[in-house]
Amino acid sequence: MLRISPHIRILRAQRLHGEGKLLVHAGQHVDQGDIIAEEITGTDYLLLDISRGLGIPEGKISQYLHCQSGSIIENGDILAGPLGISRRVVRSPIDGQVALIHEGKVLLKTGNQYRSVHAVYPGKILNVIDQHGVVIESSGTLIEGEWGSGDTATGKFHLLEENSINHLDDIPQDQFLAGRIVCVVNRIDSRFIQKLYDHGISGLVLPSIDPALVAFVSSIEIPVLLLIGFGELNLNANLIDLLRDLDGKETIINPAEKRVPDGIRPELFFPRLDNGQSVETPDSIPLEEGCSVRVTNGAFFGSQGIILRLEGLNRLPNGIFVDTAEVLLESGRTRSIPVPNLIALSGKTLTGGG
Amino acid sequence: MSAEQIQPSVLEAELYRESLIRARSLLVIDICDQNTRAVLFDAVDNHYRLIAASSKMFKSTTGDQGIIHSVQAAINEIELITNRELLSADRLPILPTRMNGSGLDDLIVTLSMSNQIRILLGGLVDELSVSSAEILAHTTYSKILAKLNLQSIEDLLSSIESIVITRPDLIIITGGTEGGAEEPLLKLLESIRMGCELESEPDRPVVLFAGNQMLHDRVIQRLEGITDYHLAANVQPSINRQDIAGAHIAIAETTVNIRCQQDTELSELSRWAGEHVYHTPAAFSRLIRFLAEARSSGKGVFGVNIDPHSASYAASFGGDLSMGVHPELGLGNLPRVLIGTPGLLDEIIRWLPVEIPSDTVHAYLLNKHLYPDSIPATEDDLQIERAAARIILMKLLDQYSRTESWSRSNLKDQRELPPVEPIIAGGRVITEPDDPVSSILVLLDGLQPRGATTLVLDPHQIFAMLGAAAGLNPALSIQVLNSKAFIHLGTVISPTGRAKSGSPILRAKIEHENGGKIPVELLYGDMLSIPLSSGRSARMELHPLQNFDIGMGGAGVGGSLLVKGGSVGIVFDGRGRPFLPPDDPEQRSERYRKWEQGLGG
């Protein structure tokens, strides 16, 4: 887990992949799940060979055509002709619009296939991006994770501090856990994950997983979010306390693949009606003495700490020359960590995993 | 036969004279995925040298965390290092140099951003032109969305739909040998024209036509006024010949244009550089090709680069060029391949010189995917990355062995590298830390060259920059290539064959410039080195035993060789080819210790 922001305003863009029609406007409030756009997922075309239909060469059909690019056509309309004694014509077999006329052929657009686009986050439509998407402003608690798989889902957050599979057996299936976003505090195996899936949970949040489980986790049909990473990485007591406070609250799990340049990370978001205290900060906090950091490589991966001193260029035990920082880790130990392996956390960040 | 230096001396002399007349300073700015590098080159004592380098991260592509801001910050750092004013008051590069010494003569931008260009391929036959189009697509950072072939061309509607649905940035059309079939290609062009017309103008894909050149007029006729298009040399001029050398330049230029169109800050940067903007892998391969053309040994030149976001290679023999850019093989992206490729983790572990538990290796690589630009902090982490680098090198060779250029080498074993000299390698995972023996082992394990070759490291990642600069200032490129900015590891002799472990497979006599002679006996399974420092050369007599092949004319054939030194010297790799380290971790660790000792590590 990179960062927990308990009371914050976030801005999230939702873009259409292609053409479509936005159904909302700037300033409008939307609830999570509201339809905000109809996106065209495919277009139906019909190609009519006019030259073959009339039985004349491509170069001669222009004088017989009764339509042009953009013309609205109804079923039975004459597209070309009449020609010759038999007064041969080509009629449209369907309603549509002429998309193209080229070399004796007419391409008719006969309809679009649409998909409804639902608001992932509740909040105010801050602006509309050139008819290609919207930016939604929302307030609440944000927990940013490290890795995710699957699609966005919503549900009540449930913290499971018990990782005994027998405990799950005691819970009746299709009750209680069904539809929830379950966060398991401890490390679990594939049987436990399968059991949770069988209970009908809507999403799964874990501190970390055994790397051998990554293919399995990627294949199950619910979103999964890792807060810290891969390997034996555990949540600390502070974070577990904070997660306890969120138990039972509505949450959105968005396991989007991390794209650092775009600021996109897998995340959990707990919306609240009131305004957040501050707008989410970008990942641009400079690394300096006194700032809170997370370690992103090596033996202390996932640990948090505070920079005591920027040490300048140093030789690591493996021989690499690199800028290092002296970091007081939350375990109480002080370690020299390469600066490229540190990310600064916001001043509002609470101490999390490690 | 001689192990030559990496530049032709006659050409250098000519260009050197030119450089004495008018030395020009050059700043190269390389835009990578999340950072900007700026490198200043200038003449010192009548020789061009790398003067200063700086690197700055950027967090978004625009604004005060954006590319332009990071470029200015990187230039500021160079100003501080050199005590030379390079930016004007309005934060623009000062071009050209002023009388007071401030400013620059030339500015070049190279683009190494690995975000992929979305490509639709169109050709006639899957095994020929479509395959050539795919190889061409892999000369840039590409994502192939769909392929159209002869069958799909017959269904005009589905071809049009492919374009509308996939919404590519670029369509590559190949096919039709010179003077060959025209009708199917014209149909394909027709569907592409119609597909483009269905898109609004700004969203229309660029079309690159690299098929039958007899059709160029008709391509122009169909696409003029509809969308941007480029005409390139035919990548499949005959059924038996594939040639991407001409078309890869066109695709590189198209990549740069698409990037600049998509990103206003890159477009601004392009204006600063007077449109001297180059695609990094193309600039890299340009210099590889130039070096190969200048060689007299009949060998080719091979270059590799591994960074966190992509891996690439370029190979050139005479005028021939093969290259490949593979984002999926970037050190930080390899874990994605790991998830979908059973057995790959075991392959990586097989090349670990130290014993590390499998789940530790797995977790390290997956976490590296989360933070690709992080660096290995411990010896074990470094070894994991280097084991992965060995596999990446093998996979690059796999890609190379799919090209027709490789096929023309008539080699038997897949992954066999044709005779090349030198091998130029870049990427932190290979060049850092400054430990030549470890770097040599990674390269020899991953590429397994045969016969004699030389190994050169590019620790400052400037080889592609020099490729980009070669058109503007060839003297600078050649002189910096021959400077200490590159690390010459030495000459490697790798006999091919099989023998009983510990039995002699090669005898050699090394005669130093001062007349001193050193006899060498290489045993099967061993590695050893004889010191010969950079800039020194020696004459070597080689006598292969047990019918081993040292690339001097066949099995058992020996001869005399002039070799150049390097930081390790002359290396003898007696492990045979192809070579696999022991499966047993303990034995493997023991062997690697022994090999490192043999190489003076």
Image: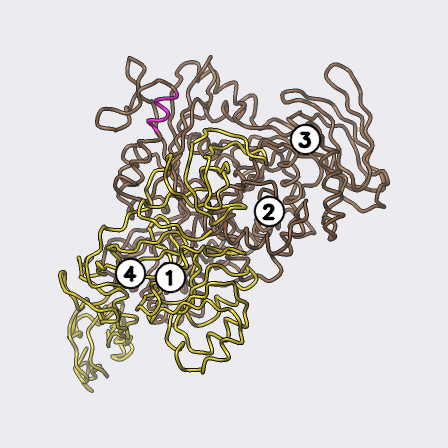
Q: Would you say residue A114 sits in the magenta stretch?
A: no
Same subunit, tags 1 and 3: no
Chain letter of the residue carrying label 2? B
Using a 10 Å C-alpha cutoff, classify the residue at mark 3 as few (fewer than 14 neighbours), some (14 to 19) or many (20 or more).
many
- Label 2 vs label 1, nearer the camera: 1
Q: Earlier in the sequence, mark 2 or mark 4?
A: 4
For residue B478, say whether it is visible.
yes
Question: SS at mark 1?
Answer: helix
Looking at the figure, which quarter contains the N terminus of chain A?
A: bottom left
Chain name for mark 1: A
Residue at left offset 64%, top offset 32%: B297
**Residue type, numbered disc 3:** Thr
Q: Position of residue A33 (x, y in %)?
A: 26, 71
Look at discs 4 and 1 and give the one toward the viewer: 1
Q: Residue at x 39, y 16 (%)?
A: B22
Tag nearer the camera, 2 or 4: 2
Question: What mark, if any, has residue B491 been given in the picture?
Answer: 3
Where's residue B560, x and y in %?
A: 76, 28
Magenta part of the protein: which range? Answer: B75-81
Q: Which residue is mark 1?
A: A243
What is the display colour for chain A? yellow
